[in-house]
Image (cartoon, helix red, strand yellow):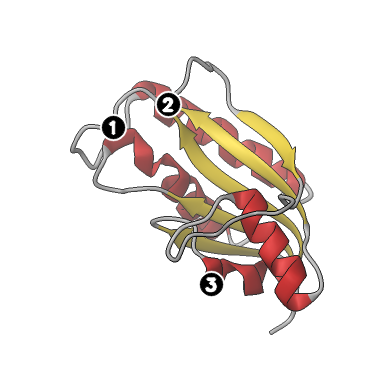
Amino acid sequence: MKPSNLLVIGYGNTLRGDDAVGVRVAEAIEALTIPGVRVIVAHQLTPELAQPLSETKQAVFVDAALTAETEVSLKPIEPAAGAQIMAHTANPGALLALARELFGRCPAAWWLTIPIEDVGFSESLSPKASKGLKEAVERIRSLAGGF
């Protein structure tokens, strides 16, 4: 497989309202078919994502954030030193460390978090998460060269 320039990993639970916003952002990016951009949609971060991470130049992890934050946040991530990965779940820094350990490289990476308010049983997004989704897509488009 040809290496991608940008890997977008959107994750969350699509049955828990706003928790699905990471998945929805990834789906929106995939629908744009931006050259050089690969998209992975996941329920949660797992060790299997280390390989595609090792095959890209840049990565963006997209997730919901149930915090007091009111704005979409894009922060750089470094491989976590001494990272522990549980059998079925990991965090972005641990996955970067695993990619480097197993495959000899990891990409430059960012964690894009979107403020949310409702994680009840639902398949729809709140107005707050919907607003964040639009901004997140624009941020990723900028990272991908403005497509």
Q: Is residue 58 left or right of residue 71?
A: right
- Nearest to the eye among marks 1 and 3: give it: 3
Q: Are marks 2 and 1 in contact (CB under 8 Å)?
A: yes
What type is the residue that disc 2 sits on?
Leu
The x, y position of residue 65, in whole percent, is 47, 30
Can residue 7 be seen here? The reply is: no
On the image, numbered disc 1 is attached to which residue?
Answer: 119
On the image, numbered disc 3 is attached to which residue?
Answer: 48
On the image, numbered disc 2 is attached to which residue?
Answer: 66
Residue pictured at 74% horizontal, 52% vertical:
79
Label 2 and label 1: CA atoms lie apart by 9 Å
Q: Are marks 1 and 3 in contact (CB under 8 Å)?
A: no
The x, y position of residue 141, in whole percent, is 68, 45
**Which of pointers 1 and 3 lies earlier in the amino acid sequence?**
3
Label 1 and label 3: CA atoms lie apart by 26 Å
Query: Which image quarter is the N terminus in?
Result: bottom right
What type is the residue that disc 1 sits on?
Val
Is 124 drawn above or below residue 145 in the view shown? above
Residue pictured at 75% horizontal, 70% vertical:
101
Mark 3 crowdedness (10 Å alpha carbons): few <14, some 14-19, many ≥20: some
The x, y position of residue 72, in whole percent, is 58, 27
Q: Quadrant of residue 116?
A: top left
Mark 1 crowdedness (10 Å alpha carbons): few <14, some 14-19, many ≥20: many
Element under label 1? loop
The x, y position of residue 99, in whole percent, is 70, 68
Label 2 and label 3: CA atoms lie apart by 26 Å
Is 113 drawn above or below residue 6 in the view shown? above
Element under label 2? loop
